[in-house]
Each structure stands twice: as C-alpha cells, then as structure tokens.
Image: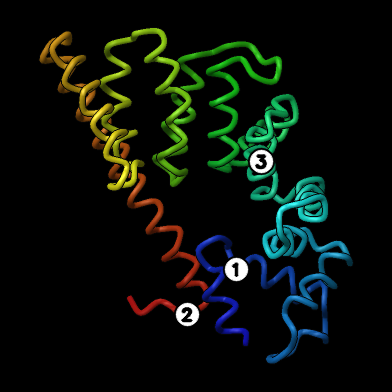
Amino acid sequence: NNQKFLEKYIPMYNLAKINADFKKTLGEAFIEDFDLDKYIKVAADNGSPAMMYLYSHILPKGELKQKYETGAANCGWTEAQGMLSVHCFMEKDYEEAYSWAKKANEKGDYMGANTLGQCMLMGYGNCEIEEEKGLNLILDSIARGAPIITIGLAYKKYIDEQNTYQIYFLSQIYLKSISPNQTGMIEAINENIDYTKNMLSQEEIEKADNLANKILKMNQESVQSIVRSNLTNYGLAKF
C-alpha cells in the first residue's frame, strides 16, 4: 500500500517534491490504493522527471535503469544528475561523470559535488587538476551527507604520495567508513595514524583532529536531517 511504499523510499527522496510532481502528471488517476509501480512507470513515460528518477531505482541494474535515470537527468532533475555522475564515475566514464557532476554541483547537489571533487583531485574527465579544491569539495559533500567511504580515493592518493599530514587527517575520517569485521583494514589504518602522528607537530595533530571530528559530526547530523526532513514532510515522524 501507499504507506509501505513511502516508508520504503523515504530515506532516498524528497517525497513531498516527488508527490507534487506525481499528482500533476497523473491528474485524476492519483487515488489512495493502486499499483504504484505501474503508475510510477506511467508518470515516468509521460515525462515526469521525478518519476523517471524514482522508477530507475525500482528497476534492476541494466540499460533500462540507465535510460530512466538519464531521462530524469536530461530533464534537469538534480538528484538524478548527481547520481548519474556517480554511476558514470564508477563505470570509469570520467568525461560523462565530470559533465553531470558540474551540472548537479551548480544546483547544490552533494553527490554531484562529491564526484566533481573526485574528478578535480585526480584530473579525471579531462578536467584540470585542482587538488585543494577537489579535496575540499569531497570533504564538504561528506559533511552534507555523502557516504564517508568516498574519501577512499583521496586517501589512497595521499598514501601513494606519502603526504604525512593528509594521511593522518584522512585516516581519522576513512576509519569511520570501515565495517567492524574488516579487522585487517582497521589495523592498517590505525598503523597509518600511529606512524604519521609521530611525524607531525602537536599543532598539526590538533588541527587535523578538530577538522576530522567536525566533518564526521556534520555528516552524522546531515544524514539524520535528510531522513527526518523527508519523514516530517509526510507526517510520518513522531518528533
């Protein structure tokens, strides 16, 4: 039913915005009890960007899923542009990733900002390498709710470059993304922390610790805020 559907998808979408677009596209067809998957597809095929994006998440991985996500992105749906940039990046289609990331970031999407930061950090997608700006975009996106694990590429880069301060600083953040059962990875990160800590001044250590803690706290608050906001929009939150 509708309630179960909303509870299933609330963590991923601003459903108040999607619902308004949904009703506009379906008109009188929007009723209390109906086959939501069917009507989402109808709305998507009738040109609703929100429903294209939502329907892409219902579909399994493949060309059809990509078709609807790309359709929503081409219609200007910000979240679709941000997620498409992520998927293109994962597929190593860096030029497309960079292009979609720029569009999404311009509209404030944190996943677009994250992908853009990755591209700028490494020079992917034929963009100019802007290391500091790229890292700042990644860190800012994590503070706004992007997955902490996305710091991994930057972390590896600075390990390869033996950048002591960045290894120590990013280790504090990256450690929080590792599952407790990945004991080998946890031990390796803690070893990096111990090793680099002995090579830094007390001032550098305090600076890194304070910034890492701030970013991690903001990430936790941002993730909670996103879910709480979507719940509240539908009157499902009890706080």
Vertically, is 11 above or below 141?
Answer: below
Give the Cα distance between marks 3 and 2.
32 Å
Q: Element type at marker 3?
A: helix
Image quarter (top left, top right, bottom left or bottom right) of the C terminus: bottom left
State yes or no: discs 1 and 3 in contact (Cβ < 8 Å): no
Q: Element type at marker 2?
A: loop
Q: Which quarter of the figure has residue 195?
A: top left
State yes or no: discs 2 and 1 in contact (Cβ < 8 Å): no
Residue at image x 36%, y 41%? 177
Image spot of residue 123 (x, y percent): 61, 15
Q: Which residue is mark 3?
A: 87
Q: Tell me: 55 left or right of 169.
A: right
Q: Which residue is mark 2?
A: 235
Mark nearer the N terminus (3 vs 2) = 3
User: Callout 3, which amino acid?
Assistant: His
Residue at image x 41%, y 66%? 228
Front label number (3 vs 2): 3
Vertically, is 233 above or below 53?
Answer: below
Mark nearer the N terminus (1 vs 3) = 1
Q: In the rendered structure, find residue 15 and report the number of the disc placed on it.
A: 1
Label 2 Cα neighbours within 10 Å, binned few <14 / some 14-19 / many ≥20: few
Say which of 217 and 106 sits in front. 217
Vertically, is 60 above or below 166?
Answer: below
Label 1 Cα neighbours within 10 Å, binned few <14 / some 14-19 / many ≥20: many
Say which of 36 and 238 sits in front. 36
Image quarter (top left, top right, bottom left or bottom right) of the N terminus: bottom right
User: Callout 2, which amino acid?
Assistant: Gly
Q: Tell me: 32 left or right of 191.
A: right
Q: Which quarter of the figure has residue 98?
A: top right
Vertically, is 166 above or below 43?
Answer: above
Give the Cα distance between marks 1 and 3.
22 Å
Front label number (1 vs 3): 3
